[in-house]
Image (tube, coloured by chain):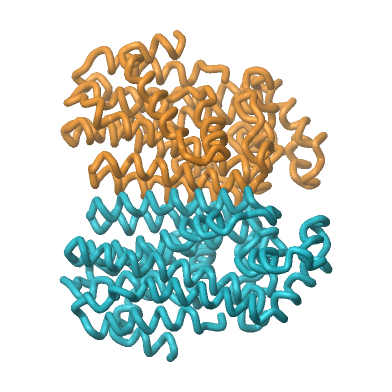
Chain colours: A cyan, B orange
Amino acid sequence: MELSEIYAPVQGDLDKIEDCLKSVCKVDFPHLAKLLDYSLRSVGKRIRPILTLLSGKSYDYNLERLLPMATAVEILHTATLVHDDAVDKSSVRRGRATVNSLWGEEQAILLGDYLFAEAGSLTASTGNLRTIKLFSETLKIISWGEISQALNAYNVKLKREEYFDRMAKKTAALFVLSTESGAVLSGAPEPCVQLLNEYSYNLGLAFQVVDDILDYVGTEKELGKPAGADLMQGTFTLPAMLLRERYPQEPAVKDLFKNKDSQADIKKVIEVVRNSPDITDECYRIANDFCAKACRNLNQLPDKPARKSLLELADYVVRRKK
Amino acid sequence: MELSEIYAPVQGDLDKIEDCLKSVCKVDFPHLAKLLDYSLRSVGKRIRPILTLLSGKSYDYNLERLLPMATAVEILHTATLVHDDAVDKSSVRRGRATVNSLWGEEQAILLGDYLFAEAGSLTASTGNLRTIKLFSETLKIISWGEISQALNAYNVKLKREEYFDRMAKKTAALFVLSTESGAVLSGAPEPCVQLLNEYSYNLGLAFQVVDDILDYVGTEKELGKPAGADLMQGTFTLPAMLLRERYPQEPAVKDLFKNKDSQADIKKVIEVVRNSPDITDECYRIANDFCAKACRNLNQLPDKPARKSLLELADYVVRRKK
């Protein structure tokens, strides 16, 4: 099933998010307008704003309240990507040149700051203090996760619990902001807010595990960036972790990062993972487990079309090739 | 008069801001705790949190409400400095190595993000929507100003109004957030909020003009960083602007930035400014004009000790050597 089918119950409203993003780009400073347009109007999957909308569907769904928040989570996500790319000195994302590669690292840092502020501003416009507080806490958690990841670059001894903790901070936290804000702004009862958060937290973990698998097994065309980018940047993720656990004597693993600049050593590890179905199967099993956890209590949600979309989204997150 | 004397009416509460900053550094991640401690506990002038406290003094001064906000403006200021230094690749600030020079640009970007979020979180904890909205809008304005400054690097044709507009965005906006939040959180009547904002806006402009003068005429010891840093980074400020207006035929001016890497050309401009009292006098006249504007309506404020401190602070801002 394609994303467009999954998104069907809120497609009209998703279009309005695109209009909001377009409005954000309209600033009286042509250079900034260009940067905003370039970064916000690229074709992401828009999963986070969709989570905000779908979370509100079962309750007092009020588009006027949800729209700024759904736009905010997408902009916050974009801001983190812009800074990520600057930190990693990445040149390509989603098949397009990154902001830092086109306008320099300085502009990428400052554009990211502007985007954080814009996301904060839209969140503030909801007038909902719980959501506003969660927004800032989420950005703290994401930054914490990113600092920890940068600190652990080239650390092949990273433990599984550290890896999952990092994913929870880097990815799942923003998924939780997306559902919690949507549910709270729609007056969902607290148990339902928590149920949606359990969904999004585990969906976020599944999403990140799959991202980490695809970085090994995907093609450059599918990924929109070169495969193996994580390892090239010294980021040790689940596939390499499992390889090291299962085949500690494998030379490619033993040599990894001994010479940080050795592309050959890194390519070898990627090759070994690609040719080890037991590794990729195990990664997918873990991702599927998170998805099962995500969905286990969704039947308690009242709205049927939205619930169906959330279930399908979980399925999509594991199935996707990009 | 020393800052400590000016700060006297709120000195006890300023100490509590230091305690708040100390609490912010207590996180369960030793590396991050170290970065926070290093960046937040350096000895800045703490002008912005003082503005927040002094703005509340004439009204319903409630330290519990003001403390998180005063801490937030100082943290927001620190975040912008951390990113500024990363953008400019500066190695020294306030006589100490910068975060980017000690831990790398990546960590500086991510630490700045964390600090923005922490400042947002403290602001959100005030529960005051007007202040929360102003916080995000201010960060947007600051980023806008920084993007504009980076875009205009090496632009010797920068116009005065563009220079002042950039200063309003880069510096005065945060001064305004500091007073407006203090006044609003203390229930000041709207005309008094506006009066304090008129003060802080012009104080911010005066502060930045003096910063820009000191960058030419100060010593490395006083500045805590090498003199001439602005020009080295291609930032064209008031002294060079006046030099160009008054002595367009001066060779040092005509050659400026023709060869961006020519330290000799840059040093020559700095020397000419240092030896042109008519230039520095004119810059100080402009700074004093902003200060006069800042103070012209302060007599309408009820609280005498706080009003006295604000007047003395304006005087200090122009007199200071660092």
Closest to the observer: B172 or A127? A127
Residue A41 visible: yes
Could one spot residue A95 in this view of the protein? no
Q: Is residue A54 left or right of residue B241?
A: left
Find residue B218 and report its horizontal and vertical position in percent: 64, 21
Task: Establish if A53 lies above or below A305.
Answer: above
Expressed as whole percent of the image width and height from the top left, the position of residue A35 reads 53, 64
Q: Is residue A311 above or below residue A258?
A: below
Q: Residue at x 41, y 42 (%)?
A: B118
A178 on left or right of A301: right
Q: Give the total number of marks visible in the rendering.
A: 0
Whole-percent x, y for residue A131 in the image: 28, 55
Q: Is residue B192 left or right of residue A210?
A: left
Residue shown at 36% from the left, 49% from the top: B137
Q: Where A292 falls versus B22 (above or below)?
A: below
Note whether A181 is above or below A6 in the view shown.
above
Tell me the quadrant of the picture where the N terminus of chain B can be found: top left
Q: Nearer the viewer, residue B95 or B41?
A: B41
Residue A219 in percent (x, y) is at 67, 82
